[in-house]
Image (cartoon, rainbow, N blue to C red):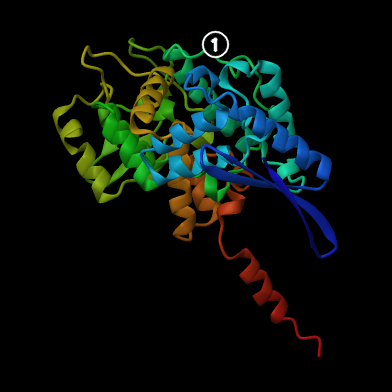
Amino acid sequence: MGSISRTERNGNVRYVARVSLAGKQTARSFTTERAAKAWIREREAAKSDLTGRPDRDPVRKGVECHMADAATSGAKATRKHLLENLGELEWKPLDTVRPEDVSRWRDTLVAGRPWADGKPLARTTVNTLMSILSTIFNEAVSKGHIPRNPVKGVRRVPGASITVEPHELITAAEVRAVAGAAEEPVRTMIRMMALTGLRPGEVCGLRVRSVDLDKGVVRITEQADGHYGEWGWKAPKTPQARRVVPLGQATIELLRSRVEDGTAGEPLFLTELGRMYSTPRLGALWRRAAKNAGVEGHSLKSLRHFYASALIEAGRSPVAVSELLGHSSPTITLEVYSHLWPGEHEATRAAVDALDLS
């Protein structure tokens, strides 16, 4: 049987419910005793479902198994975040979860989590957790444990913030892992995007002549037209996207043989059959490599954020970062990356301390 204890801190009463399942004790606090009792009843009911049938395993167990398979610390942390925020889904058997359950869970994360003092999660974070949950159900479907994925078809949260939070950044280890799981030339394309901040269409549209090894720069004057296979180019996303990006020595060496052995007007990156890459095709190959590397919650755009964060950490100004990324204005840069600029509170304190009102 589960147990409930009443606690009081700073005038706030909480009811801590505890229950043992599969030899492990789980606890959660609630604002009402009624909610605590309901939670215990759900967990006690889940005990009878642990019959050795994978389809009757609770969602929590599926997430725990997925956590154990994490190849990087970043992936494990993201999956742990999902585990901590399963809410009503936590002890539901996999084969009983319906799309309406997922929709209700999604809405709870956005509106406010009862298990976290009513605090909501950022819309972008909610969408990331939904993607991971969908992956877990897809695996259960592929193994024949359940007939369909209940997350599939449930709309992601609209209007997700474009602001990049520090904890959402892909790590260097994750970039290396995904690149290592990809075949050439996609491996080099991934590394180059992380080291230059180029958009997918821009890296697909690079010509051999775009890279100047002597000056150590890459010139962005066009992008791939989006048709996989055929060679074709179109104008950059915006006039500001036409830019010159400095290359580090590691990037120069990464590209040297391709540039020296290539033909000036031809694509820098081609498939084995001589086809030109497109953004959708590169994205599909990224997802395959990321899955094989155990890296979740990231896309090709994450490589651009990775590059931007390195510039910001190095002390580059918003204007400089905007120019290197090819943003239409520094306003866009600040809207996306404002949370990454360090030292704002310290700078504010210094400015206030400098005011002499004595």
Q: Position of residue 351 (x, y in %)?
A: 68, 75
The residue tagged with tag 1: helix, strand or loop?
loop
Q: Which residue is mark 1?
A: 148
Q: Nearer the viewer, residue 82 or 23?
A: 23
Residue found 18% across the figure and 26% down from its top: 262
Does residue 320 appear left or right of residue 230 in this picture? right
Outermost residue toward the front in this view? 1
Is residue 102 at all visible to an observer of this figure? yes
Q: Position of residue 174 (x, y in %)?
A: 37, 41
Total labels drawn: 1
Image-quadrant location for residue 148: top right
Image-quadrant location for residue 269: top left
Indicate whether 330 appears above or below 284: below
Indicate whether 73 appears above or below 227: below
Q: Position of residue 233 (x, y in %)?
A: 40, 18
Residue found 19% across the figure and 24% down from its top: 263
Is residue 222 at all visible to an observer of this figure? no
**What amino acid does circle 1 point to?**
Arg
Q: Nearer the viewer, residue 129 or 341?
A: 129
Residue found 52% across the figure and 37% down from its top: 22
Q: Nearer the viewer, residue 202 or 175?
A: 175
Quadrant showing the C terminus: bottom right
Q: Position of residue 45 (x, y in %)?
A: 66, 28
Q: Nearer the viewer, residue 235 or 155?
A: 155
Outermost residue toward the bottom in this view? 358
Circle 1 residues within 10 Å: few <14, some 14–19, many ≥20: some
Quadrant showing the N terminus: top right
